[in-house]
Image (spheres, grey):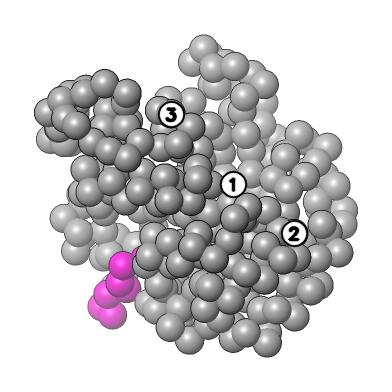
Amino acid sequence: MRISTTIFLTDETITPVRLARELEQRGFAGLYLPEHTHIPVERVTPYPAGGPLPPEYGRTLDPFVALGQAAAVTERLGLGTGITLVAQHDPIALAKQIATLDHLSGGRFTLGVGFGWNKEEAADHGVDWGTRRARTREAMHLMRALWAAEPTAYEGETSGLSVRASHAWPKPVAGGTPRTLVGGAAGPGLFSHVADYADGWMPIGGRGLTQALPALREVWEGAGRDPKALQVVPYAVLPSPGKLAHYEELGCEEVVLQLPPGGEREVLAVLDDYARYL
């Protein structure tokens, strides 16, 4: 099982360059970065984990810029978002960012797709909260049209998103789309997104997988997807030997461990501890 990591990189933490080099030297499989453009001070949306919102949420580096730095100083390390708030982006520009990073990294990029939790942040982007999932789905199909081998037009049914048949290069290295994982809580709506346009599911924390996987596989296979192709990648996990063994028994081929949003000394000490799971 591949062991990857995630961290809230900020202007106060270890740098992307130093972290990426240390991860690759130690043999970790990947680095996934979250996204928040800003956190409105006046907000009513509660922090999903409860309590006050940790300060790193408002200081998060742009994941694509940070991953570009990481790509430039590594050769094998996987690079991903965990997650990209797709509905908050212009999908034409986002498709270019994704394809460029994938191209420059030699096909090492994984797109983590998410729907968000902070209503105020989304509202500032002009996102209607009730339709953000539908917008995300149509944005994904628009980007897939731009990544297609031949110029392909797309017109969304509900979001107003559309693109003319266009020349759009570079393309994702593997052809078609980059590896795509959808993050979020288990449920029919989430699983329909996974089966529609993704390669698998990125469950936060990895809890309840034993109960959720049969339902996901049913939706996946009902959509005509290859049962052997489904990927499940537990995300932001605080590891223990028993927990990782359980994921491996369930067929997970990758797990993403949570690093603290700290300085160089703190983060490298945790990496040294996590290295025992490699």
Q: Does the magenta stretch include residue 35?
A: yes
Q: Which residue is drawn at 43% across and 61% down?
A: 68
* Apparent side of residue 228 relative to residue 6 in the rendered image (left or right): right
Q: Is residue 71 in view from this perspective?
A: yes
Q: Which residue is drawn at 36% across and 43% down?
A: 99
Name the magenta segment's main secondary structure. Answer: loop
Q: Residues within 10 Å of mark 3 (few under 14, many from 20)?
A: few
User: Looking at the picture, how far across and down is residue 123, in whole percent?
Assistant: 21, 60
User: Looking at the picture, how far across and down is residue 107, in whole percent?
Assistant: 50, 42
* Apparent side of residue 140 relative to residue 103 in the rendered image (left or right): left
Mark 3, residue position: 175
The answer to whether 250 is drawn above or below residue 87 in the figure is above
> Magenta residues?
34-42
- Of the two numbered discs 2 and 3 on the same chain, state the one appearing first in sequence: 2
Mark 2, residue position: 27
Quadrant for the N terminus in the image: top right
- Amino acid marked by disc 2: Gly
- Say which quarter of the image contains residue 240: bottom right
Mark 1, residue position: 203
Q: How crowded is mark 1: few (under 14 residues within 10 Å), some or many (20 or more)?
A: many
- Of the two numbered discs 2 and 1 on the same chain, state the one appearing first in sequence: 2
User: Looking at the picture, how far across and down is residue 209, in whole percent?
Assistant: 69, 40
Helix, strand or loop at disc 2?
A: loop
Quadrant for the C terminus in the image: bottom right
- Amino acid marked by disc 3: Gly
Label 2 to label 1: alpha-carbon separation: 23 Å
